């Protein structure tokens, strides 16, 4: 989704949270929703989140369906909610297709996971890294390594080709020298034949008969030479095939059966994935339940017209430390509700831990399954190749037998042709016959040398052409090496940037807010050994450090548990801002929504809002009237949601 051009945003809401119907226009820059608790400020923020794509909003309790419409510039976006039994389904065409980044780092309501992670002391790295598809990165790394290994092998082959070139060229020179010698020998033999022919007195017919006989012998010897060359080639092929068969047999015989069954592992992986999906649903549902109940506890989730006694519905909820439970209708103590909420938070934390363990086991089993399948594929390929080699050996042996029979027949044929030639009675015949035989042998040798020189020329040309590709392959290898480095360091860069962003912004915000005796809050990125499933692995952790100073100026390290509520809320907001900047969320959604700042005093709220407004085109914050009074008049103020 491309970021919209800055313009006023018109929002129509129906049956969301505690809102029956509302229509609000928000200008660009900063909008402040001001009012007492239970005036639908949080409900409106949740409606705005829904229109932007979030699923962290709820239907009005007595409604079966609700809707949000956003008009941004020339575009209109919609989000519908419909009750389906005990659940709510979402539809429409919202601003975001995938709201994960915005839910984590832009929609900063009280139950925002990034804010709460700081308050609860959860794994901050897991929050920052959640949008990064590390499984996809690992798969891409494996593919790059495979391509790199193939290139390395090809480059090594080309290096060996270049290494062999001098030997080929020397072989060619030797063959050319042999050819020149053979041609000289042939020329000398032909001169002797011409002299003999000149002295032979015979009829033209007898001479032609003799020449034809010699030619038949030459042709027969040429055919025999070709057959013997083919036989030598087939025997060489047979030897190579038999050697390959022995290697394949050893591979198959030495292959060990895997300890586990890949199909059984696949069933276990499917079972774990179903468990993970179930945990995802439980975690999301618990998050919604916790958020709803937290809103009800502080009053922001109640409709202004709910008919609660007194000017402030929160007073009614907490009067005499007793309240009417909004789920069962019975009167219970406020501390019981808080205890239940704590148990829900603990349950959600346990579910998160279990999901991490399930993820680790899925990865471990997937790796083992992949190894087993790879080993099985290698055995199957070896067995298939062994069958093919057996067939090739049988076929080659058949061709060898056929060639041996043809050679024997050709030799008999040549003997008969020579006998016929010898029967021709011509003066000087014996000498001429011997010279013709010699010439025939030299001609065959010349043909063979010419063929061998042509083959060497072709091989040299092919090798030189292949070697020219080597530089291109080396360039590809360098590109792959760079890509591997980039992939391997991508996660590190995100982690490092997140820590840098948090530490930088935290330092600035603490300077602005001027907390007494709070010197520094910072994140340390370090490696730690943790258990995932049945194995120990090294993982990166984000450790949050707090440094305070005593009245005498002595610095000491404190813990998150000792932060004041105000300090904790500010730290959570800054952590969310770090994620907003690290993941470039502003390029995806130009909104930052903030709620539940009551723990921070008015003056500091004004400074926080002023700091955050520089990082988003649209900043919408829900504040109590006394807190809003500390903010500049230049902001847009919405005093009622209707």
Image: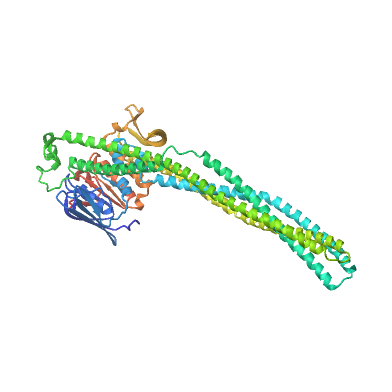
* Quarter of the figure with the N terminus: bottom left
Q: Residue 522: give x, y in percent of width and height.
A: 37, 36
Quarter residue 129 falls in: top left
* Quarter of the figure with the C terminus: bottom left
- Horizontal side of residue 507 vs 182, given as left or right: left
Identify the residue shown where x is 41% and y is 44%.
494
Q: Nearer the viewer, residue 433 or 290?
A: 433
Quarter residue 275 falls in: top left
- Horizontal side of residue 498 vs 7, given as left or right: right
- Horizontal side of residue 612 vs 430, given as left or right: left
Q: Considering only vertical position in the picture, is 325 above or below 217? A: above
Q: Considering only vertical position in the picture, is 92 above or below 551? A: below
Q: Considering only vertical position in the picture, is 563 above or below 609? A: above
- Horizontal side of residue 346 vs 448, given as left or right: left
Q: Residue 353: give x, y in percent of width and height.
A: 32, 37
Question: How many badges with numbers are in the image?
Answer: 0
Q: Residue 142: give x, y in percent of width and height.
A: 47, 46
């Amino acid at each position: 989704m491309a970021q919209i051009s800055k313009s006023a945003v018109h929002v129509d809401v129906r049956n969301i949270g505690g809102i029956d119907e509302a229509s609000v226009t928000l200008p660009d820059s900063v909008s402040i929703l001001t009012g007492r608790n239970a005036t639908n400020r949080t409900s409106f923020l949740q409606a705005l989140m829904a229109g932007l794509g979030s699923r962290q909003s709820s239907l009005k309790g007595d409604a079966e369906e609700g809707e949000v419409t956003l008009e941004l510039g020339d575009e209109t976006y919609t989000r519908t909610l419909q009750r389906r039994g005990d659940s709510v389904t979402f539809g429409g065409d919202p601003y975001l297709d995938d709201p994960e980044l915005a839910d984590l780092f832009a929609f900063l309501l009280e139950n925002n996971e990034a804010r709460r992670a700081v308050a609860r002391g959860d794994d901050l790295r897991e929050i920052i890294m959640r949008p990064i598809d590390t499984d996809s990165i690992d798969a891409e790394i494996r593919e790059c390594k495979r391509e790199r290994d193939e290139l390395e092998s090809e480059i090594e082959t080309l290096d060996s080709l270049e290494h062999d070139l001098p030997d080929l060229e020397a072989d060619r020179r030797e063959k050319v020298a042999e050819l020149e010698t053979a041609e000289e020998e042939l020329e000398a033999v032909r001169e002797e034949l011409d002299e003999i022919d000149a002295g032979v007195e015979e009829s033209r017919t007898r001479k032609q008969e003799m020449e034809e006989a010699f030619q038949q012998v030459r042709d027969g010897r040429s055919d025999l030479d070709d057959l013997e060359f083919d036989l030598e080639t087939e025997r060489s092929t047979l030897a190579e095939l038999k050697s390959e068969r022995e290697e394949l047999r050893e591979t198959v015989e030495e292959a060990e059966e895997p300890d586990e069954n890949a199909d059984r592992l696949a069933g276990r992986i499917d079972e774990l994935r179903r468990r993970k999906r179930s945990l995802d649903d439980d975690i999301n549902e618990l998050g919604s339940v916790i958020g709803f109940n937290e809103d009800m506890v502080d009053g922001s989730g109640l409709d202004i017209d709910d008919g609660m006694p007194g000017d402030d519905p929160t007073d009614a909820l907490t009067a005499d430390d007793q309240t009417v439970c909004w789920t069962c209708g019975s009167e219970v103590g406020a501390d019981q509700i808080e205890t239940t909420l704590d148990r829900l938070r603990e349950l959600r934390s346990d579910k998160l831990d279990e999901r991490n363990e399930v993820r680790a086991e899925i990865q471990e089993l997937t790796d083992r399954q992949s190894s087993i399948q790879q080993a099985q594929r290698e055995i199957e390929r070896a067995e298939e190749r062994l069958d093919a080699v057996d067939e090739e050996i049988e076929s080659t042996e058949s061709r060898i037998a056929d060639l041996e029979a043809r050679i024997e027949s050709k030799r008999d044929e040549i003997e008969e042709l020579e006998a016929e030639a010898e029967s021709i009675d011509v003066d000087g015949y014996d000498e001429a016959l011997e010279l013709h035989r010699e010439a025939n042998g030299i001609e065959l040798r010349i043909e063979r040398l010419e063929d061998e020189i042509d083959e060497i020329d072709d091989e040299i040309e092919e090798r030189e052409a292949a070697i020219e590709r080597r530089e291109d392959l080396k360039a590809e290898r360098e590109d792959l090496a760079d890509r591997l480095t980039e992939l391997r360091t991508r996660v590190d860069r995100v982690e490092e940037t997140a820590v840098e962003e948090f530490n930088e912004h935290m330092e600035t915000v603490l300077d602005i807010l001027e907390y007494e005796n709070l010197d520094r809050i910072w994140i340390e990125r370090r490696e730690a050994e943790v258990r995932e499933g049945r194995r120990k692995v090294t993982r990166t952790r984000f450790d949050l450090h707090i440094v305070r100073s005593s009245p005498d100026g002595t610095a000491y390290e404190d813990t998150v548990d000792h932060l004041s509520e105000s300090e904790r809320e500010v730290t959570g907001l800054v952590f969310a801002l770090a994620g907003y900047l690290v993941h470039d969320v502003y390029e995806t959604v130009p909104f930052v929504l903030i709620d539940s700042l009551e723990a921070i005093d008015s003056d500091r709220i004004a400074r926080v809002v002023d700091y955050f407004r520089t990082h988003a085109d649209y900043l919408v914050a829900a504040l109590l009237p006394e807190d809003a009074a500390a903010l500049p008049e230049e902001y847009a103020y919405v005093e009622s949601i209707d």
